Image (cartoon, grey):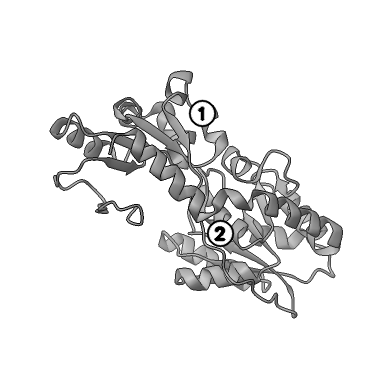
Amino acid sequence: MRELGHRVALRVTWDGTPAQLMIALHARRSHDSFARFRAAFPDSPLVLVLTGTDLYRDIQFDADARRSLQLADRLVVLQEMGLRELSPALRRKTSVIYQSARQPARGVPLKSCFEVVVSGHLREEKDPFRAAAALHSLPGDSRIRITHVGGAMTNAMAREARSWMRREPRYRWLGERPHWESMRLIARSRVMVISSRMEGGANVVCEALAARVPVIASRISGNIGMLGRGYSGYFQTGNERGLAQVLARTEANPMFLRKLQGQVAQRRHLVHPRREKDALARLIAEMGC
């Protein structure tokens, strides 16, 4: 947005600073800022970007989240399947804008193993240890190793990650890492796993698409909206045996791996930075700003 010539202030909550436009992330958590901004500047547009917890949980029962939907002049969902969670009236004011990711240099895969990366914070919604659990169901001659990067959101999650490493030597949790290092791990991996129970449009999938790395994904709406309905790399959410089957096929069958690579390449244009910038420019222009 700054590259488009706008002055942008980032805030966790609105501090009362005047602005011509507010773009808020998360219907429930941003409701107070949304409502105060609308009262103070009734003629300034409000744009609400809907997250996974918005689409697939909060707007179904939370009163503040529902009120934010009504207050918003425009809504944004981060992948095409998100539209299905909204009423026809809300869809009419909704844009689909995929998050972008810059293409990293392609890494050199490790020769010592078939490295699979999991990138994401350790949170319940992410089902973070499903890939670790899948290792038990792999064939005995599998060379798959799991590298997991992402901070633990609770001490209990950190303890569980360390417990998995003690029980399963093929699983390695690196904890929080700088973004450049996470991207380097994705770029060198054979495949990436996203096992989430709930996603609005995961940025890490955008990063895998930009890096041309195949994704093994839980079959949830948010992932389907990112990778396409005909994508071949899904497994049933919460099913580590199903995940192990897809991982084993990816490792053992070069034709299947190339198929996933080709399907990822077909979706890569969705996450190009120019596409996101152009979509934001159109949205802001429609708001008269």
- Location of the C terminus by quadrant is top left
Image coords of residue 261 (percent x, y): 74, 57
**Which mark lies nearer to you, 1 or 2?**
2
Q: Residues within 10 Å of mark 2 (few under 14, many from 20)?
A: many
Image coords of residue 37 (percent x, y): 19, 37
Instruction: Work out whether 246 lies above or below 62.
Output: below
First in sequence: mark 1 vs mark 2 = 1
Labels 1 & 2 near each other (Cβ < 8 A): no
Instruction: Name the residue nearer the viewer: 31 or 105.
Output: 105
Q: CA distance from mark 1 to mark 2?
A: 25 Å
Q: Amino acid at mark 2?
A: Glu
Residue lying at 35% horizontally and 28% vertically, measured from the top left? 69
Which label sits on residue 207? Answer: 2
Which label sits on residue 85? Answer: 1
Say what secondary structure mark 1 lies in. Answer: helix
Q: Amino acid at mark 1?
A: Glu
